[in-house]
Image (tube, rainbow, N blue to C red):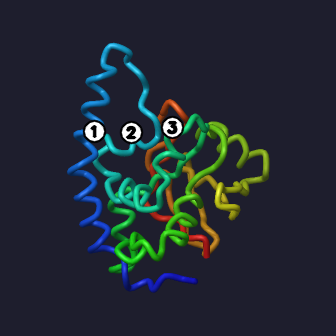
Amino acid sequence: MPVPTKTIKTSLFAAAAAIAAITPATAHNHQHHHASQAQTPNIVETAVSTGVHQTLVAAVQAAGLVETLSSPGPFTIFAPTDTAFAKLPEGTVATLVKPENKGTLTGILTYHAVAGRVTASDLTTLIKSKGGEATIETVAGGTLTARLSGDTIVITDAAGRATAVTQADVDTSNGVIHVTDGVFLPG
């Protein structure tokens, strides 16, 4: 069932602020505890540390996906920034993070995940080998379409919305993150 598009921003930002207040302390303790090991952070730890993915982290926590995205994977995650989430119609995020919408939220978040470690170079090679357009299957089961616009990888979701990868190949211990300037919606 589609979530009313007029309903996301306020609550999600409140949730993000609450999580941001809790999570950095945990991340700091974790880093302090393992400081001598110089361990590469996982996808969730990396998203927490960027400062521009608070909404995504809040959504991942609301969907109960922290453990999954902290597992060995590997995963490729297209990670919308807080600004990307803010582009959604007002109230959308607030509605999605409500417990009764956990299934819908999980579906949207897993639509941003691909099994395996897919680098920008892998994507570029695939796009070129497929004549300029490659279809990628997501963990959610839906597909995304990848194209090149100059040197920029552009991902189009099932609803035809195009989103640019603004920062590629953020390496993590259990996969790779590609930062996007938009949120993918499955339909």
Q: CA distance from mark 1 to mark 3?
A: 25 Å
SS under mark 3: strand
Q: Name the residue rendered at 79%, 51% in the picture.
A: 130
Q: Given this view, does label 1 or label 2 mark the residue nearer the observer? A: 1
Residue 17: horizontal and vertical position, in percent?
Answer: 23, 59
Mark 2 belongs to which amino acid? Answer: Glu
Q: Name the residue rendered at 60%, 67% in the picture.
A: 157
Residue 26 is labelled as 1
Q: Nearer the viewer, residue 173 or 162?
A: 173
Residue 48: horizontal and vertical position, in percent?
Answer: 34, 44
Q: Name the residue rendered at 45%, 86% in the picture.
A: 4
Point out the image quarter for the C terminus. bottom right
Q: Which residue is mark 2?
A: 45
Residue 52: horizontal and vertical position, in percent?
Answer: 31, 51
SS under mark 1: helix
Q: Given this view, does label 3 or label 2 mark the residue nearer the observer? A: 2
Where 23 falls versus 83 (above or below)? above
Question: Quarter of the image holding residue 83?
Answer: bottom left
Q: Which residue is mark 3?
A: 169
Residue density around tag 2, few if under 14, some if 14–19, many if 20 or more, within 10 Å: many
Mark 1 belongs to which amino acid? Answer: Thr
Left or right position of 125 against 10: right
